[in-house]
Amino acid sequence: MNKKKINTLVKTAKKEAEKDIKFSLVTALKEAAGILSENKKVSKEIEKSAGKLAGKLVKEVKFDKAALVEESKEAKAIKSAEVETKTEQAAKAKAPVKKAASKSTLKVDPTAPEISKA
């Protein structure tokens, strides 16, 4: 992979990590604040502070670029396998359905003599 793609992988990993950290901080702090009191100003302050703290913590986190590249390759392989199975299922669904053979269209004349096998 080229350097630009690796950098985008690192950026997305940082954003995901920041969201996860912020979410865990907010839930923990709101739980603790909920015990004391339920105030909207306190909730907003918790969310702001958690966002800032998460941003600072993510800056210190180092991401393994090789692991991100491997993870990306695995995700692409899984995604392509899912697409293949979906296209196969769609092809099966669109396949012409064979109708059961109808009864013989030969009409038998009841007045005709029977042919006996000797």
Image (spheres, helix red, strand yellow):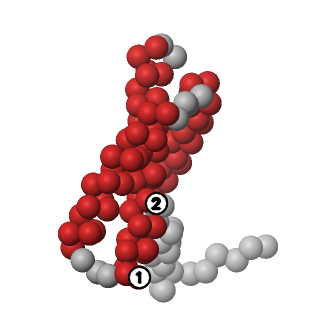
Q: Which of the 4 image quarters holds residue 114?
A: bottom right
Residue 57 versus residue 11 in the image, above or below: below
Question: SS of the residue at dot 1?
Answer: helix
Residue ID at (30%, 59%): 47
Is residue 118 toward the left or the right of residue 4 in the image? Answer: right
Instruction: Residue 94: tell me if it is visible.
Output: no
Quadrant of image for the C terminus: bottom right
Is residue 24 toward the left or the right of residue 37 in the image? Answer: right
- Residue type, numbered disc 2: Ser
**Where residue 21 sits in the image (x, y, percent)?**
45, 52
Sequence-first disc among 1 and 2: 2
Tell me if mark 1 has few (under 14), some (14-19) or many (20+) residues whose alpha carbon lies within 10 angstroms of its own. few
Question: SS of the residue at dot 2?
Answer: helix
Instruction: Residue 79: tell me if it is visible.
Output: yes
Is residue 117 toward the left or the right of residue 14 in the image? Answer: right
Residue ID at (24%, 77%): 39
Name the residue tied to disc 2. 24
Residue 63 versus residue 78 in the image, above or below: above
Tell me if mark 2 has few (under 14), some (14-19) or many (20+) residues whose alpha carbon lies within 10 angstroms of its own. some
**Where residue 106 sits in the image (x, y, percent)?**
47, 71
**Where residue 45 sits in the image (x, y, percent)?**
26, 61
Q: Are marks 1 and 2 in contact (CB under 8 Å)?
A: no
**Where residue 112 sits in the image (x, y, percent)?**
51, 80
Residue 69 versus residue 80 in the image, above or below: above
Q: Which of the 4 image quarters holds residue 40?
A: bottom left
Residue ID at (48%, 22%): 6
| Residue at far bottom of view | 110
Q: How far apart are marks 1 and 2 (CA)?
A: 17 Å
In depth, the one of 57 and 68 nearer the eye is 57
- Residue type, numbered disc 1: Ile
Name the residue tied to disc 1. 35
